[in-house]
Each structure stands twice: as C-alpha cells, then as structure tokens.
Image: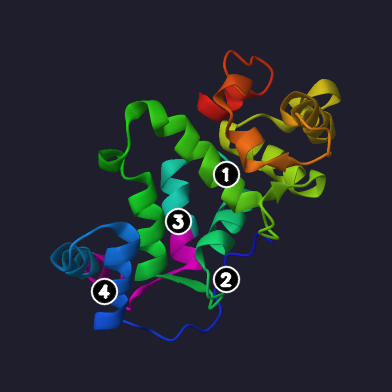
Amino acid sequence: MGSRKSKHIIPSTTLTEDQIEKMCQQLHLSPDEIRQRHSEFIHQYPHGVITREQFFDCLNEVWPETHIDKFASHLFATLDQDRNGGIDFMEYMLLTCKLDSGQMNVNDDENVYLGLLFDIFDRNHNGYLEKRELKPLVESIYDLAGLPEGERRGVNSSHAQVKYLLNKLDKNGDKRLSKQEFLNEENWNHDEQFGVLFFN
C-alpha cells in the first residue's frame, strides 16, 4: 500500500460500440458525449490509461501540502476495477460522472462525498465498514486534513476515533457501519469531534 509504481499496462486508445452502449446505459450520456469525453481523455492521456504515478501526481496538485499516499492508494484500488495497474477511460468516467456537480443538487454534495468514502474503504465490498476498514479511513482523512502527527494522540488517535465513529453511527450495535448508517446526515450535523474534518 502506498507504492506509486504501476504494473505493465496494455494501452487501449479506442472504444468499441459495445463499450459506448454500456457507458450510455450506466452514465446516462449520449454516444456523442461519450466520444467527445473519450477524445479529451486520450488527448490528456495518449496511451488511454492513467498510470498510478500520474494519478498520484494529480492528487498532489489537489492537496499539495498534505500526505496523500494512503488515500490515493485506496482510491486508486477502488477505481482500478480490472486490477491492471491503471485507470482506463471507463473507470475514469464512473468517478467523474458521479462527482459531476452538474448532475448533483448542492444539498447532495456531502452524501456523494461520504458515499465515495464508503465505497473506497469497503475493501471487501460486503456493504459494511468493518473496524479494520475504519482505521485507514480515519488515517487518510487526517492526512488530507493536514493534521500533524503530534495531534493524533489520545482522543485524536485513530483507535479512539474508530471507537467514536462506531459509538455514534452504529445504530444496531453490530460493531460495523452499513452504508445507510454512514450516510445518515443527522449523524454528521454539527459534529465537532470528527465531522469537521470531513467537510472543512
């Protein structure tokens, strides 16, 4: 976890009609929109894929003064669905369309963000965040928020924050968080201990 090196990737710069049709169905875009976005993608990434190194560099530009490696590794693994060591156009579009502000109501921004976090850290894809999956989530949020290592102790330690999240969000007491529990906005409203790190 954390390495910026990519595997050997077989370049793919073309889209088949089947791929276009599948993306139209999944993303609710027209074939012309898919082709236009693919053309722009290939212009930026001529080999038809975003390598791990390029992906980390992009996130470094978004968060230039923070340690993004842990978060970037988890996000990259989520997007690289075929596990070939790169993010192709279809994988890229699934994320960008999900985050496209033109397709979201402003009031939904936090839920989209939390939903993406849930999907990133639900590593076994069982629909729950287990205790072992919450720890890297907390550590990644700390990294992105730029919280100094010296302030990650006591009540601010990742262990203490995992316990806090479970106590606050786990409504049925099964010691894990369902997506519904995690996305419940009432759980995050005016949360001064941890929610502030998610949304500031």
Q: Which residues are magenta?
A: 41-55
Q: For mark 1, give the secondary structure.
A: helix
Residue contact between numbered discs 3 and 1, judged by CB atoms under 8 Å? no
Choose the circle earlier in sequence order: 4 or 2: 2
Between the C-alphas of marks 2 and 3, the distance is 12 Å
Question: Mark 3 and mark 1: span between their CA atoms?
Answer: 20 Å
Residue drawn at point x = 41 percent, y = 46 percent: 61
Residues 183 and 50: in front is: 183
Residue for badge 1 = 117
**Disc with the residue nearer the chain's start (4 vs 3):** 4
Q: Residues within 10 Å of mark 4 (few under 14, many from 20)?
A: many
Residue matched to label 4: 20
Mark earlier in primary sequence (4, 1):
4
Precedes in sequence: disc 2 or disc 1: 2
Residue 47 drawn at (x, y percent): 33, 78
Say which quarter of the image contains residue 21: bottom left
Towards the viewer: 150 or 94: 94
